[in-house]
Amino acid sequence: MIEYIKSEIAALLNKQYPFITPIVEEPKDASLGDISIPIFELAKKRNVPFDECKSEVETLLRAHFKELITDIRLVRGFINIDVNKELVASHILMEITKLDNNYGTLSIGKDKTVVIDYSSPNIAKPFSVGHLRSTIIGHALGNLYEKCGYKVVRINHLGDWGTQFGKLIVAYQLWGDKNVIDQDPINELVKLYVKFNELEEHDPELTEKARHAFKELENGNEAYLKLWKWFKEESLKEFIRMYDRLGVYFDYYLGESFYTDKMDAVIKELEDKELLVFDDGAYVVLLNDLVPALIKKSDGTSLYITRDLAALFYRKKTYDFNKILYVIGNEQALHIAQLKAVVKKMGYDFYDAIEHINFGLVLQDGKKMSTRKGRIVRLEEVLDEACLLAKTYIENKNPNLPNKEEVAEKVGVSAIIFNDLKNHRVHNIEFDLEKMLQFEGETGPYLQYTSVRINSILKQVASIHINVVNSLFNKSHYFEVIRILDKFPLTLEKTVKENDPSILSKYLLSLATSFNKFYSLEKILVPDELIRNTNVLLSRCVKVVLDEGMRLLGMQVIDEM
RNA sequence: GGGGCGUUAGCUCAACAGGAUAGAGCAACGGCCUUCUAAGCCGUCGGUUAGGGGUUCGAGUCCCUUACGUCCCGCCA
C-alpha cells in the first residue's frame, strides 16, 4: 500500500519534473514521516529555494491523493509526508485477512521453471555443517520460487563420481574390513580416506593406483562398481536421515554418476565445434577471460566440469528451465564461470540462465573445513546439541508441556536453520557452536516464540471480527506493525530477486520485534469489544505472515513451547 | 605471482537506487511478571565504517590506492 503510494508519487514527479530523477523513500526514523522526498536536485537544477519546491510538490500531491495524505512538511531538504494511517492500516489488515496465507503470493514466475541444484554432498563423507548452507539456502529458495509461481525442480547433485572413488577403492582393498565398516560405515570410510590422503603425500604410487582404479570404474569394472554402490548406499542412509530431520526434500537424487554415459555426446559436440584443444596430453576448451577448462584428462577420464556440462544439457533438455541455480560455495566461482563460458562458446544462449548462488565457507580455526585433513564437524552432533538445549529450556519454562521431545526437536532444528539463513553473506563464517545454540535475541526460537504467544491468545478467541477502532492505528506501536506487514510482498519479491533468504529472515525478525513491543505495551484481550477486535485482528495478521515466512524459510511452526 | 570475495561497536552482523543523528542482537550493567507464555519488553555502556586520496549539495555505499583475511588458479570435487 505504502509502496503503491510511493510509486504513484514517483510517477507524478517524473511527469512534472522530467529533468530530475525522482527519489521517493521512507525515512529511517518513522517519527520523521511515512514517506520522504529529497529535493536537493530539484532545488538545485531550478535554482529555487526548498520551500518553494515544497509548496509546488504539496499542491501536486494534495490534488492527487486527497485524504490519503494527512500532512506534508519540509525538513532540511526533505519533504516528509504522513499517510492516512487509518485508511492504510484497515486496507492492509483486510487484505491479509482475506488472502490469509496467500498474502504475498506472487505470479512473477508463472509458466516458468527453475532448476535448483543444492546440498549435493559427497558420497563416503559425513554430512558436515559445511553442507548445511547449501542445503538450507537451496531448500528455502525452492519454497520462495514456488511462492512466486515458478515450477521448481529440486535436484541433489550427489558427488558420487570422480577420482576420490579410485582412492577409496584402493584404500579399501589395502586396509578395509567389511565387518568393521558395517559397524559404522561413514566414519570407517572416512578413516580409510584420510589415511590414504596422508600416505599419498609421500607415495606417488598410491596416486597412480587410485587413478587407475577410477579409470577401471569408469570403464565398468564389476567388482569396483559393486564397492562403489555399497559406499553410496551407506552414505545415502545418513544423508536421508539428515534431510528428514531438516524437513528438506528433493525431486531428484541424480548424482554425477548418472551423467557418465552422457558425457561423450558433449565431448563430441565440443570436437565438432572445434572447441576442444589438445594440450599437454589433455583436452581443454580455451576461454577468453578465464583459465582454460580441462575437459578430459590425459588418461581419458572425465572431470567435474565434464560431468557438470553433461548434467546441464540433460537438465535443459528434460526440464526446459528458464533459470538454473547452483547453490554452491564461493570456492567454486571459477568452476561455474567456466561452465557458463563453455556453454556460451558452444553457441547456446541459455548460459545466461545459469546463476551461481554463492556463499561464504564455514571455516574452522580460520581454515576451510576439509574431510581429507579430518577437520570437520558433523551436522548430526550439532542438531542433537541444539535439540537437547531446547529440551532444557522447555523443562525450565514450560514443564507441563505435552510432547516435549517433539517440540524440542522442532525448536532445535529450526534454530540451526535460522542461524544459517539470517546472515547469508558472501563472507566466510567461523564455525561457532555457542552462537548456533543461541536461543535468545535474533534467533529462530524468537520467531517461533512470537508465533506461539499469538497462538495462545487466539485460542481464547471464538472468531475474528472486522469491526475495529480505526483511530488506534494512529498510535505508533500499532502502525509500526502495520507498516511491516505491508512490506511482506515486496520483501518476498526482493528475496527472490536477490536469491537471498536472509532478506526474508531479517524481515521476520523486524516483524516479530514490532509485535513483541506492541504486546508489551498493549493488553490484547481487553473487555472493550471493539478494541479487542482491533488487537486480535492485528495479532492474527502478524501470525499469518510470520508463520508463512517461517514456512518459506523451511522452519517449523509450533503451537506451544 | 595472477584473479575473486571480504574488512562497520569487545563479538556476530544490519543499513533500500548515494540521503537526515550509522542501527540490531550477543556480552556487561540496571529496571519490568498476583494480569494474554519473561525464549519477552525497556534502559545504560559501546563507532575516526581497516588506512590514505578522489568524485558532489551529500559517501559505510561510487572511483583510485595501501594493508590485512580468505578462496581459486588444467589432469580433485
Image (cartoon, coloured by chain):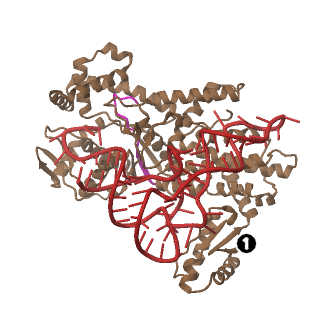
Chain colours: A brown, B red
Extent of the magenta region:
A110-126
For the stretch drawn in magenta, the main secondary structure is loop
Q: Is residue A91 above or below residue A72?
A: above
Name the residue nearer the viewer: B59 or A63.
B59
Query: Is A115 colored magenta in this rendering?
Result: yes
- In this view, the residue farthest toward the bottom is A47
Element type at mark 1: strand
Q: Percent from the top left, x then y, of residue A126?
A: 39, 29
Identify the residue under disc 1: A71
Describe residue A548's horizontal placement relative to residue A468 as left or right: left
Tell me the residue at 71%/67% (across/down).
A83
Q: Percent from the top left, x then y, of residue A184?
A: 38, 18
Q: Percent from the top left, x then y, of residue A316?
A: 34, 49
Visible residue check, residue A100: no
- In this view, the residue farthest toward the top is A179
Q: Residue A365 is drawn in which quadrant?
A: top left
Query: Is A556 colored magenta in this rendering?
Result: no
Tell me the residue at 47%/28% (across/down).
A380
Name the residue nearer the viewer: A50 or A58.
A50
Q: Is residue A461 above or below residue B66?
A: above
Tell me the residue at 30%/15% (across/down).
A178
Visible residue check, residue A117: yes
The C terminus of chain A sits in image quarter: top right
Tell me the residue at 11%/43% (across/down).
A281
Q: Tag 1: residue type?
A: Asp
Q: Chain of mark 1?
A: A
Q: Is residue A489 above or below residue A38?
A: above
The N terminus of chain A sits in image quarter: bottom right
Q: Residue B74 is drawn in which quadrant?
A: top left
